[in-house]
Image (spheres, rainbow, N blue to C red):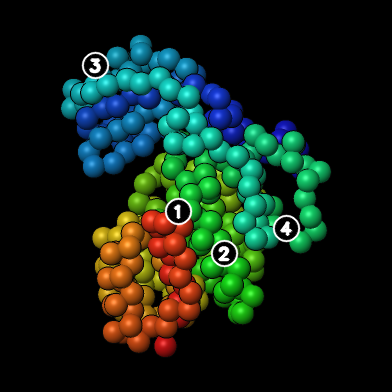
Amino acid sequence: MKRSDLPEAIVAGPDEELYIYYLKGRVAPGIDLSAPGFIGNWEEDGFSFLFYSQACRQRIAALLAAQPQLEMIDAFQMPYAEWLGERPVSYRVGRFDIVPVWDIERKENDAGGDLHRLILDPGVVFGSGTHATTRDCLRALEIVYAEEGPQSVIDLGSGTGVLSLAATALGSRSTLAVDNNLLAVRTAARNFQMNGMTDRILTVQGRAEVFIEHPADLMLANIHFDVTRRLVKSAGFLQKKWFILSGLMRSQAGSIGEHLVRVGSIIRQQWIGEDLWHTILGMNP
C-alpha cells in the first residue's frame, strides 16, 4: 500500500506547524469553519479549539464578529508533535504494527507475515497509540483473542480508534466505537476507512454511560476514572463477558478492583505502565 492510495492525512507529518485558536464558547451549528489549512474543531466544556495548518487570523476575526457569544482567549503556534505531547512514530506491540500514515511508504517493506499492520492518522486527537495504557490494552486484547474470539466489541472513549482497529484485526465482526467528542469520532472514522474496516466498525458520538447497555462480548474502556467507576456499576457492564479497563492510577485501580471482586468479576491479569497507569483484564460471571 502506498500513501497515495490513502485519504490525505489530517496533518502532513510530525513537523507540521499547528495554528490553534482557543475560544470561549461553542461555534453555532452549521457554521462553515473551512479555510485553507482547516483541520478541525475540538469542543469541550464550553470551549473551542480551532486547528489550522496555516495562520488564519482574518477568518477567526470574521467568525468572532459574526458570533458575539464567542470570545478569543488565546492563539498558539506550535509543532504538531508538541501538541500531542510526543512525536508519533511507528511501533510494535506483540503482533501489532502501528504505522502513522506519513510513515507508510518507509515501512512498506518492513512487515512480517504474522503482523497486524494498522495505519493511524491521529490528527489532533490525543492518542497516537504509544501511551502505556494503549500498549497494555493491546497486550490484553491479544490474550483475550488467543483464548477466545469475541465476535462483538464496544470501545468506550475510543479516541483515534486504535483499539477498535486492533480488536477488529484480531477477529471482531462487529465493533462499536464510542466517543463523546465529535472531532475524535471523525478522526476515528477516517482511520477505519484507511484500514478497510468500515464494514465491521461503526463509530458514534455519545457518552459511554449511555452506550454501556449495548450488547457486546468484550468491552474496552481506556477512559477517565470517574466514567469507569460509573460503567462498572451498571447492569450493562455485567452483561459483557470480557472487559479491559485502563487509564487508572494506583488508588483508582484499587477502588475498581475492590468493586469487581464484590460483584463476582474475575480479574485475569493486570499491568502497570510507567509505574503509574493500571490496566485490568477480566471476565464477568
Asked which secondary structure carries label 2, the reply is helix
* Tag 2–tag 3 contact (CB < 8 Å): no
Q: Which residue is mark 2?
A: 139
Q: CA distance from mark 4 to mark 1?
A: 25 Å
Image position, residue 154 (x, y; %): 46, 66
Residue 159 or residue 7, whichever sits in front: 159
Q: Earlier in the sequence, mark 4 or mark 2?
A: 4
Residue 106 or residue 11, whichever sits in front: 106
In the rendered image, the vertical position of residue 267 relative to residue 173, given as above or below: below
Q: CA distance from mark 3 to mark 1?
A: 47 Å
* Tag 4–tag 1 contact (CB < 8 Å): no
Q: CA distance from mark 2 to mark 3?
A: 50 Å
Q: Earlier in the sequence, mark 2 or mark 1?
A: 2
Asked which secondary structure carries label 3, the reply is helix
Q: Is the residue marked by circle 1 packed among few (<14), some (14-19), or many (20+) residues within 10 Å? A: few
Q: Earlier in the sequence, mark 4 or mark 3?
A: 3
* Mark whose residue sits in front, 4 or 1: 1
Query: Which amino acid does the dot numbered 4 rest on?
Result: Leu
Residue pictured at 48% horizontal, 49% vertical: 131
In the rendered view of the protein, which quadrant contains the C terminus? Answer: bottom left
Is residue 122 toward the left or the right of residue 265 in the image? right
Q: Is the residue marked by circle 4 packed among few (<14), some (14-19), or many (20+) residues within 10 Å? A: some
Asked which secondary structure carries label 1, the reply is loop
Residue 105 image-quadrant placement: top right
Say if residue 259 shows up in the picture: yes
Q: Which residue is mark 3?
A: 65
* Mark whose residue sits in front, 2 or 3: 2
Q: Which residue is mark 1?
A: 274
Q: Which residue is mark 4?
A: 115
Image position, residue 80 (x, y; %): 49, 28
In the rendered view of the protein, which quadrant contains the N terminus? Answer: top right
Residue pictured at 33% horizontal, 31% vertical: 49
